[in-house]
Image (tube, rainbow, N blue to C red):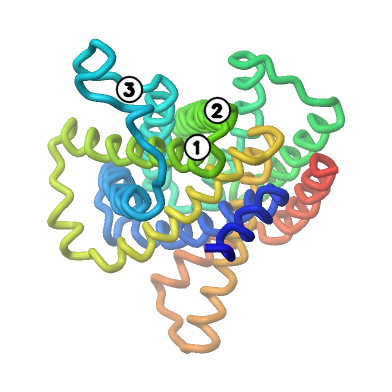
């Protein structure tokens, strides 16, 4: 336990390291999603429902083994003169989680249109604009001009990622409209969760305060999966039964990415900085795709047409992406100092 406490204390003072863990882990999952689309998932509903429903597993584990405070101060039944009462901040955490999973509906919808997750993540990186605007209008947050400049430079790098003609040919206003919804919904989730963690931190609950907020987020994500399944009359259990082990592995990686992202939101000076760091997902997708191609082509000698087509597509415009990465790194350096 002492080791875990030391690690937690170390991470509190290194928010950028925690922030980068999220895009690293998400990129690994996104690369697999490229294969899942059309191979395991029939449409965007499958991906959204599976992503949400599997959140009940970490929620249960965290609740049973790590939650040490009385939840009666947040949720009560038959107390305070009312039949049921729930702390508004927990409701906001639930809403943040619900919105997070809901954004994946548009993520998978766009991915089924163009199976290039790096290109998709470039557009999703517009959260770097949406989050600061939302924090300003909702909470009145103002950052220094230098920090906004650093975020702008990072955004410029992200835009350069889409300069390649092959990437621009995939662009359409219909595709953009789908992803704009993903950006808005995900940004709202980040801003709401930032408020949740700030409020719980002010109550002096320490790491248990973060855990309460994160449990609310995770439960909200699960409820969104249930909602989409019921609303669209989709039974996910045959698919879960068939690919249970695969889903457990990759949804587990996705959960760790979510945990890193939420912890970064909790400890970072501003949620806008976290949104900036998370624009690096396409960069790590590029790295992962190169590794996959290396493994399949050079080590296993399996140059299957499916693997070649799927992962070669992620490398379109590789030199532009490399230049963009350098520019994005400069932007991050500015906001970190």
Q: Are marks 3 and 2 in contact (CB under 8 Å)?
A: no
Q: Does the rendering let one see residue 180?
A: no
- To which residue does mark 1 refer? 209
Mark 3: few/some/many CA within 10 Å (<14, 14-19, 20+): few
Q: Which residue is mark 2?
A: 203
Q: Mark 3 or 1 closer to N-term?
A: 3
- Residue 274 picture quarter: top right
- The answer to which of 39 and 3 lies nearer the viewer is 3
What's the distance in space between the residues labelled 3 and 2, CA to CA?
16 Å
Q: Nearer the viewer, residue 252 or 86?
A: 86
Residue shown at 40%/52% (left/top)?
Answer: 66
Find residue 86 and name its label.
3
**Alpha carbon separation for disc pair 3 and 1:** 15 Å
**Image location (x, y in percent) of residue 230:** 16, 34
Determine if residue 59 is in view. Answer: yes
Q: Tag 3's secondary structure?
A: strand
Q: Earlier in the sequence, mark 3 or mark 2?
A: 3
Up-down relation of residue 126 to residue 50 (above or below) = above
- Mark identifier at residue 65: none
Judge the density around disc 2: few (<14), some (14-19), many (≥20) Cα neighbours within 10 Å.
few
At horizontal 53% and vertical 57% (from top left) the residue drawn is 27
């Amino acid at each position: 336990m002492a080791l875990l406490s030391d690690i937690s204390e170390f991470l509190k003072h290194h928010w950028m390291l925690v922030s980068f863990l999220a895009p690293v882990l998400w990129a690994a999952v996104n690369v697999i999603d490229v294969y899942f689309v059309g191979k395991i998932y029939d449409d965007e509903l499958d991906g959204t429902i599976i992503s949400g429903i599997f959140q009940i597993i970490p929620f249960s584990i965290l609740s049973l083994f790590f939650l040490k405070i009385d939840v009666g101060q947040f949720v009560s039944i038959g107390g305070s003169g009312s039949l049921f009462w729930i702390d508004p901040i927990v409701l906001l955490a639930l809403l943040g989680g619900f919105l997070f999973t809901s954004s994946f509906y548009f993520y998978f919808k766009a991915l089924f249109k163009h199976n290039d997750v790096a290109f998709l993540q470039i557009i999703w990186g517009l959260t770097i604009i949406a989050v600061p605007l939302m924090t300003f209008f909702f909470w009145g947050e103002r950052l220094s001009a230098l920090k906004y400049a650093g975020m702008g430079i990072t955004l410029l790098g992200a835009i350069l990622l889409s300069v390649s003609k092959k990437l621009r040919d995939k662009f359409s206003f219909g595709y953009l409209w789908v992803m704009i919804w993903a950006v808005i919904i995900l940004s709202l989730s980040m801003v709401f969760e930032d408020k949740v963690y700030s409020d719980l931190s002010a109550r002096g609950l320490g790491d248990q305060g973060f855990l309460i907020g994160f449990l609310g987020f995770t439960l909200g994500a699960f409820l969104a999966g249930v909602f989409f399944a019921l609303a669209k009359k989709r039974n996910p259990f045959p698919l879960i039964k068939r690919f249970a082990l695969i889903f457990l592995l990759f949804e587990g990686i996705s959960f760790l990415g979510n945990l890193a992202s939420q912890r970064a939101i909790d400890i970072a000076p501003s949620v806008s900085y976290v949104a900036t760091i998370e624009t690096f997902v396409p960069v790590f997708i590029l790295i992962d795709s190169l590794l996959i191609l290396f493994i399949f082509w050079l080590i296993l000698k399996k140059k299957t047409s499916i693997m070649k087509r799927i992962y070669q597509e992620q490398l379109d415009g590789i030199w532009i992406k490399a230049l963009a990465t350098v520019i994005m790194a400069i932007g991050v350096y500015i906001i970190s100092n």
